[in-house]
Image (cartoon, rainbow, N blue to C red):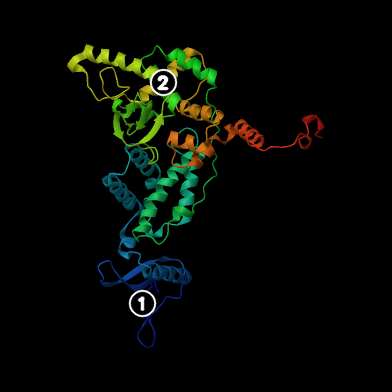
Amino acid sequence: MFKRCPCPPVTDASGRRKNCPRRHGSWYFAHDVRDPSGKRRQLRRGGYDSAADAREALQASMTATGQGVRVQDQRKTSVADYLEGWLERKKDSGRFRPSTALNTHQHLRDYWIPLLGHYRLSDLTVDDVDRALASIRKEGTRPKPLSAESVRRIHATLRAALNDAVRRRVLQYNPAALAELEPTRRPKVRPWEPDELGAFLDHAAAHRLGVLYEVLAMTGLRRGEVVGLRWADIDLGKRVLWVRQSVVQVGYDSVVGTPKTASGEDRRVDLDEATVGSLIAHRLRQDEARAALGEAYEDNDLVFPREDGAYLKPEVVSKTFHKLVDAAGLRKVRLHDLRHGQASIMLAAGVDMTVVSKRLGHSGIRITSDTYTHLLEGVGRQAAEAAAALVPRGSTARPGVDQLG
């Protein structure tokens, strides 16, 4: 360790330079390391206020390099450089969904690079991440502060990027993984009651997209999954469909990709008889429209295309839904609540949670349970009564309600 300051050098009796005793300047450390090519060189760091700080940093640096952390990247790489490189690698991997890539780019551009990009990657601490998160919670990019769930998603982007840095031995630990986050709770969903759903489907039946909303409500498919549904994915005779692709909107473009989760990909969804009947009638009308347009029809084998056969934009499905809801005079809900409504109806009918989870394509049953726990009160009571009815009891051992006190 040594100190640098503007004072002239002072040496001892042996001719060795002495550290300046005055309380100014900065402390530095240096130690030998092996770079990624195996060559020996010296690593230097400075700017510490005291010898104790420099000694602590020296010990941490020697520990990190001893564990294989790449010191060359430590010295030269800024947080901004690493995040931009990480995003490009993710895009090149081919495993990045277009919508995920768009959101990740926005998180880095609007939050992490402006707030943390100027730091050296190796100098980033948990305190730095905590301060950045506090700033994001307070200001965000909207007139009102971001919700805890939005902040959690933004944080997840940084955590994933720095996990990659740890995996590549560029960082010793991930400071984002240790940052403090506000607790969040899944909002209680309030889908339509069966009579409300029936009123909407009756009102929407005459609309060109009426059958699309019926399929959403009766299968629990996601918006992108129903927009990407093809006739080749449906077996009307066996009353079943398979979810094999999904359409997401990236800017003004509709991009075809895989479903949101691995468990949701290529999943089987059984159809009820009424929905199959609606699909048959819908196909007949579609065949007539195709014949009328002739070569102008763009045949993508889609169940719910635009009038000319091209891919329907997902946002059009949502906007049309809200217009139909207003025209029907019904309680306002989101399009996604049709999916929640399917889960609600199935749970009320006593369908097992595992079956509901697989039908919806959730990545795990915990998501299903956390989202719909508040809908299970009546189901749990029915299950308790059904289980008790299986146990034979004598009449004297079963007191009536009026005997309980």
Hey, which residue is sitting farthest left in the picture?
A: 295
The residue located at (41%, 20%) in the rendering is: 275
The residue located at (29%, 16%) in the rendering is: 286
Which is more N-terminal, label 1 or label 2?
1
Crowding near pointer 2: few (<14 within 10 Å), some, many (20+)?
Answer: some
- Amino acid carrying label 2: it is Thr
- Which is more toward the observer, 51 or 68? 68
Secondary structure under tag 1 reads loop
Q: Quadrant of the N terminus?
A: bottom left
Residue 395 in picture, x, y percent from top left: 76, 34
Hey, which residue is sitting farthest bottom in the picture?
A: 13
- In this rendering, the answer to whether 153 lies above or below 332 is below
Residue 5 seen in the current view: no
The residue located at (54%, 39%) in the rendering is: 370
- Which is more toward the observer, 158 or 206? 206
- Amino acid carrying label 1: it is Pro
Mark count: 2
Q: Is residue 274 left or right of residue 306?
A: right
Q: Which mark is residue 9?
A: 1
Q: Quadrant of the C terminus?
A: top right
Q: Which mark is residue 255?
A: none
Q: Report the residue marked by disc 2.
A: 275
Q: Which corner quadrant of the image does residue 280 belong to?
A: top left
- Which is more toward the observer, 125 or 100? 100
- In this rendering, the answer to whether 285 lies above or below 317 is above
Q: Assess whether mark 1 and mark 2 are in contact (beta carbons under 8 angstroms).
A: no
Residue 263 seen in the current view: yes
